[in-house]
Amino acid sequence: MSEKPFLTPEETVREYARAWNEGYDEHEESLKYLYTWNHISHTDTRDMLMDEMTDELRPFFAAFPDQNLHVEEVITEGNKTFVRYTATMTMTGAMMGIEPTFKTAQVTILEIDIHRDGRFHESWSRTDTLDQMEQQGLLGDAGKSFWY
C-alpha cells in the first residue's frame, strides 16, 4: 500500500467530509486514516477514543444511510481549524430503540480540531441534536418552539 500524502488542516477537513459522504462501510479505512492513533473526540455526550468512535458510527450510518456532510466554512490558524458543517440526513433505520421516522433533517455541526501530521488529533464537536429531533418528529408537542 502506498503512503498517503500529507494533508493541510483544511484539506483534512474536506477529505473527511468527502469520505463521510461515501458511507462508513465503503470508506472506513479512509476515515480512520484521517485520525492519529490516539485521537480523542469530545462530543455532545462524552469523550471518545478512536475505537469507541468507530463503534458509535456503525449504528448511526445504519439509521441514516443517506447522510450528507457539507463543509460550510473552515477557519484555519496554524494546526487548528474551526469548521461549520451542515448535515442532511433521513432516518430510515432504527437507532437506540427509536423506530425510523423517514423524515429528513438538516442540522448544523460546529467543530474545533487540532491537527498533527496531517491528521485530526483532538476534536471538540457540537451538533444541534434538539433541532434534528424536532425536524424528524421525535419530540411531539414538546418540540414546538416557544419562540414562534
Image (cartoon, helix red, strand yellow):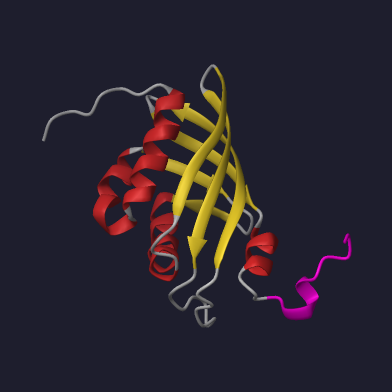
| Quadrant occupied by the C terminus | bottom right
Expressed as whole percent of the image width and height from the top left, the position of residue 123 reads: 54, 40
Q: Decide whether residue 54 is among the magenta residues.
A: no
> At 65% from the left edge and 75% from the top edge, which residue is drawn?
137
Which quarter of the picture shows residue 72? top right
> Can I make out residue 78 in this image?
yes
* Magenta residue span: 139-148
Quick check: is 142 in the magenta stretch?
Answer: yes
Please name the predominant secondary structure of the magenta segment in the image.
loop
Where residue 59 sits in the image (x, y, percent)?
41, 69
Q: Is residue 69 above or below residue 129?
A: above
Residue at image position (68%, 68%) is 134
Residue at the image position 27 percent from the left and 50 percent from the top: 27
Q: Reply above or below: 16 against 61.
A: above
Residue at the spot 60% in from the left edge and 47% down from the top edge: 109
Q: Quadrant of residue 36?
A: top left
